[in-house]
Amino acid sequence: MSQRGVEALLGRLITDVEFRRRFFIEPAAVCVELGLDVTPRELDAACRLDEAPIVAFAERLDPRIVRAPVNVAPAQPEKPAVGGGHRGLGSEEITGPKQQRAR
């Protein structure tokens, strides 16, 4: 078994709309094309997944962690309400402290 291959497959299913669409049409061909290391048994199990809950979960992901569809303009993220939104790192925590402007 290839746990990494399964994880890569599941990750792509939830973060990549185009991959997900193609996978549910031609699962084996897509896995071979991308070099995903999954066994026939693992592929069979993945093929039995219900696409609807995967899509529902994927649609709830933060847009910053999903692969943007090709030829589609990226959606503008909504500004969270005061006191709302995602908890976690803010942009300043990711990019570092803001530089002060020279006066």
Image (cartoon, rainbow, N blue to C red):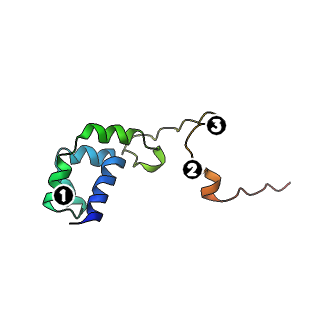
Query: In the rendered picture of this protein, how many numbered marks are placed on residues?
Result: 3
Viewer-closest of 101 and 94: 94
On-image quarter of the C terminus = bottom right
First along the sequence among labels 3 and 1: 1
Can you identify the residue that label 2 sits on?
88
Query: What is the crowding at mark 3: few (fewer than 14 residues within 10 Å), some, or many (at least 20)?
Result: few
SS category of the residue bearing label 3? loop
Q: Amino acid at mark 2?
A: Gly
On-image quarter of the N terminus = bottom left
Residue 86, horizontal then vertical, whole percent = 55, 43
Can you identify the residue that label 3 sits on?
83
Residue 48, horizontal then vertical, whole percent = 17, 46
Residue name at image x 13 percent, y 59 percent: 40
First along the sequence among labels 3 and 2: 3
SS category of the residue bearing label 1? helix
Residue name at image x 65 percent, y 34 percent: 82
Find the distance from the CA under tag 3 to the CA under tag 2: 13 Å
Find the distance from the CA under tag 2 to the CA under tag 1: 33 Å
23 vs 74, left or right, is: left
Residue 94, horizontal then vertical, whole percent = 60, 57
Can you identify the residue that label 1 sits on?
42
